[in-house]
Amino acid sequence: MLNRAARFAPLVGLVGILGPAQDAAAGEYEGSPKVAQFVGEMTRDYGFAGEQLIDVFREVERKQAILDAISRPAERVKTWKDYGPMFLTSARIARGVDFWRQHEAALARAEQEYGVPAQVIVAIIGVETFFGRNTGNYRVMDALSTLSFDYPPRADFFRKELREFLLLAREQQVDPLTIKGSYAGAMGLPQFMPSSFRAYAVDFDGDGHINIWSDPDDAIGSVASYFKQHGWVAGEPVVSRATIRGDRAEEGLSPGIEPVKTVGELRALGWASHDALRDDLPVTAFRLDGDNGPEYWMGLKNFYAITRYNRSVMYAMAVHQLSDLLVQARGVK
């Protein structure tokens, strides 16, 4: 998608290059006061040419399907016994082993440079997009504009991401109307939001530009970079199973994903780790509803690093357990 042969001119020079969108109702944001204010900010603060940005927004389409997707409540809250099996499938494991084998050199280098195990990088890409199979079919410009200007509950967040996306397009010299992603604007094999792309994505293959859409090496290096900068500690464990006893054990459960209690504090409440952990280690204590009843776990610093990718303990457990299954399937230590 972002190979050199297909590069577009920088965003500030798009006038005359962008033709009418073939399947979009152009002009849905033309004349919008919100868009005019946003264009003014981009012109004043970041040096964009206002008329040229307005030309881009003439091609942007408001997507009701995006508003429906982000607004509808989940049909039901899944428990771990339902959530985990969605990602820990034989097909995903087999594809992950193939992906690991095909990109073994890049994964080994990423592990050496960033300290993030190859299996964790592979698991993230597997959980996020099934190794590139499901990267999203919405134009990112449509998604972020729709959510910036027509979704008040999180408009500020998505306006920031829209700003970051336009800066990204200018820096990478790509046409912003050609980049596709999820309904929320997440992009590429690792599903980076634009702000994450600008902060953490890397040109891992050294070809002069960053391509997380169709260049697995850049996606691999970018995931490793993300985790390194979010506190991943090389060689440290991720989680530890725990056994509980007594009537105060439930008090140890963390209210969110942050590690708010230490192993010693949990021990005093009746938690016993299955591994030897120092009393002063801060952990996230959580319970999962498994096939055989409640499971109690302590998430360590690397577990918290995974939740920085997606603020969900079940997501982090899916990534961790998929990474373990990938190692087992490969038959390597």
Image: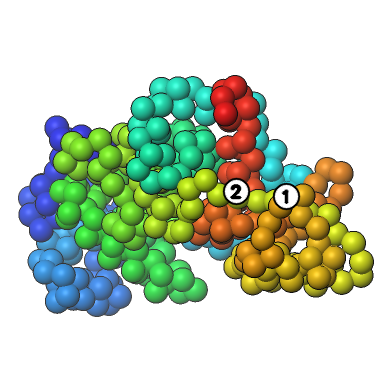
Q: 282 or 104, which is in the foreground?
A: 282
Q: In the rendered view, would you say 191 is above or below 145?
A: above
Q: In the rendered view, would you say 133 is above or below 263?
A: above
Q: 142 or 79, which is in the foreground?
A: 79
For badge 2, the amino acid type reads Pro
Q: Position of residue 155 (x, y in %)?
A: 41, 72
Q: Position of residue 232 (x, y in %)?
A: 48, 53
The image quadrant that residue 94 belongs to is top right
- Residue 310, visible in the rendered structure: no
Residue in the picture at 18% in, 64% down = 54
Task: Give the CA distance from mark 2 to mark 1.
Answer: 10 Å
- Residue 31, visible in the rendered structure: yes
Q: Name, please, the residue furthest toward the right.
A: 246
The image quadrant that residue 82 belongs to is top right
For badge 1, the amino acid type reads Asp
Residue in the picture at 64% in, 67% down = 280
Residue in the picture at 67% in, 60% down = 278
- Disc 2 + disc 1, Cβ < 8 Å: yes
Mark number for residue 108? none
Image quarter where the N terminus lies is top left
Q: Secondary structure at mark 2?
A: loop
Q: Position of residue 33 (x, y in %)?
A: 27, 77
Residue ID for mark 1: 275
Mark 2 crowdedness (10 Å alpha carbons): few <14, some 14-19, many ≥20: few
Of mark 2 and mark 1, the one earlier in the sequence is 2
Mark 1 crowdedness (10 Å alpha carbons): few <14, some 14-19, many ≥20: few
Q: Position of residue 35 (x, y in %)?
A: 27, 71
Mark number for residue 237? 2
In-image side of 326 versus 272 (left or right): left
Q: Secondary structure at mark 1?
A: loop
